Amino acid sequence: MLRTLFLIIPFLFAATHAMAEELPPLPNGPLILTSATPAMQSSEFWIRRLPDPDAVIKTPEQIANFNEFVRNLVKENVDIFRLDLTRPGRQITSQLELEFNTLRNRKLFGTDDKYIQKNFFDETIKPLVQIDKVPGTIRMRWGAAVRATSVRALPTMVKMLEDRGDVEFDQLQFTLIKLWTPVGIFHQSSDGQWFYVQAPYVRGWVRARDIAVFPSRPELKKYASSGRYLVVTGEGVNVWKDSQMTTLLQRPSMGTVIPRAPVPSQGGLSSDSGSYLVWIPYRKKDGTAGVAKAYISRKSDVRTSFLPYTQANVIRQAFKLLGRRYGWGGQYNGRDCSGFVQDVFLGFGFAFPRDSKQQGWIGIQLGFFEPFEDAAAKAKILNSARPALTLLRMPKHQMIYLGRIEQQYYVIHSTWAERTGYDPKKDEKNRINQVVVSDLNLNGDSYIGSLFDRIISMNEVE
C-alpha cells in the first residue's frame, strides 16, 4: 500500500506543522476481530492445521532465480550492483520534474489543516530540487544507509496530507529503507541535506545524514553483499556498541541483513562467544563512510543464513509481528500492509517489491477479479489455496492467507481501520492500527464492503 510521490525550511513553518500533529492513542493489541478467537492469535494454531508445514517450498538457489524474475518484471526492483556507472542526466531530470509537478498540482494539506500553497513548492521546494543542476552525464556515487531512514517524494520532512486531519498518511512518504541498504546516488539538494537515490526497490529523496558514501561500488559491495552476515528474523534486534552490551546503538527491524566482522581469537576460542561481531556503517563529518564493529547477542532472534522457506516458517515470521503498529510507508516505526508482507518474506531471502500492486504480480497467478463480483470463483480458489504462500490483494491493500475454518477464510495483515457504517460522508470507523488476524468479512457492515468482496487478485509465492 504505497506510492505517492529536506530541506532546511524556515523554522517557524516546520515547528508549526510539528506542534499541530497529535496522534490518537493506539488501541491495545493484539485485537481480536470478527470471528477470530484467542486461540487463533498463535502461529502454532495455524501450523498444526497444515499437512506438511515443514516441507521446503524453494531452495536458496530457486529464491535467487525468483528474485531475478521479479527484477525483470518490476522496474522499481533493481540490483544496485548492476546499475550503470554513468547515466544520462535527462532521465533523472524527467523524473524529478514529474514528481515535483505531480505533487505541486495536487490539493494537499499540512498538519495544521491548512491548504499547502503553490508558492511553498515554487519558492522553497523547487530551489532545493535544483533540476537545472543535473549534469548531462551523471557519474554515480554509492552509499549505504547508516540506519533505517525514510524515502521521500520531495526533499522535505513537511507532511502533506490528502485530507485534513489525515496525519498518519503523509503523501510524500514512499517507504523506509533499512540499515545497510545500498543505494546509488544520482543527485543532491542545493543545501546538501538530501540525496536523490536508487535503492533496491524504490527511488526517491533520503536525508544525506543517513547515508554514508563509499569510495567505490566494490568497496560498498564488500560489505553490503558479504557472504558472512546476520539476518534479523525477529521483530527487531538490539545492536550494541560494546561487548558488555551496555550502550545501545540502534534496533534494526525484521529482514535487515548485517555483515559480520571477523572475530579475534584467544587461544583458539572466540573472545566474543556471547555475541556476534558485526560491521555497522557510519557517516564521517565529510560524508564519507566508515565502518565500526558492534555486537549482537547470540540469544537474539537472528540467523547466520536465511530461513528455510516453509509454510510453518512464514506463519511464524508473520505472527512475530502480530499486534505491531501500522505505519504508512514505515512511519512511526510501523509497517503498512505491503511493508508487513515484505518484512515477513525478507527473512527467507526474497526481494519483494514494496508496492502492494506489484506484490500482486509476482509468483503464480491464481485469479483476477472485479470487486463485489466473482464470489464463487474466489471461494473455489481459496478452498484449495496454500496458506502462508498465498497473497490476497484488494485495491491498496495486501494480506497473507492463513486458511479456512468452517465457512470462514482467515488472513493476517497490517491494517489501519475497520469501517463500521454505511454513510461515506460520516466514514465511521474503529482504528485498528496494527497487525491482526481477521476473517474476510471485516468491513462487511460498511459502505466500502468486506475484504472478501473487494479482493481483486490472488497469487502464490511458489
Image: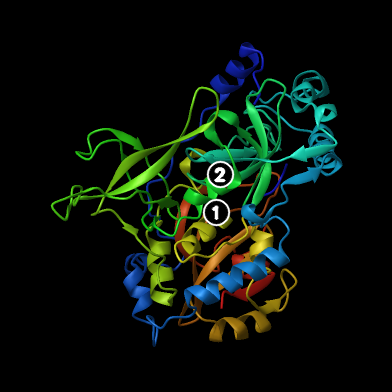
**Which part of the image, by quadrant, shows the C terminus?**
bottom right
Element marked by disc 1: helix
Across and down, in percent, residue 17 comes to 61, 21
Task: Give the percent coordinates (x, y) of residue 125.
Answer: 75, 24
Q: CA distance from mark 1 to mark 2?
A: 9 Å
Q: Which residue is mark 1?
A: 339
Dot 1: within a 10 Å radius of its alpha carbon, few (fewer than 14), some, or many (20 or more) residues? many
Visible residue check, residue 192: yes
Up-down relation of residue 12 to residue 160 (above or below): above
Check disc 2 and report its element: helix, strand or loop: strand
Q: Which residue is mark 2?
A: 176
**Nearest the eye: 196 or 352:** 196
Do residues under tags 1 and 2 come within 8 Å of each other at their CB atoms?
Answer: yes
Which one is in front, 106 or 330?
330
Upstream in sequence: badge 1 or badge 2:
2
Q: Identify which amino acid the numbered label 2 is placed on.
A: Leu
Q: Is residue 388 visible?
A: no
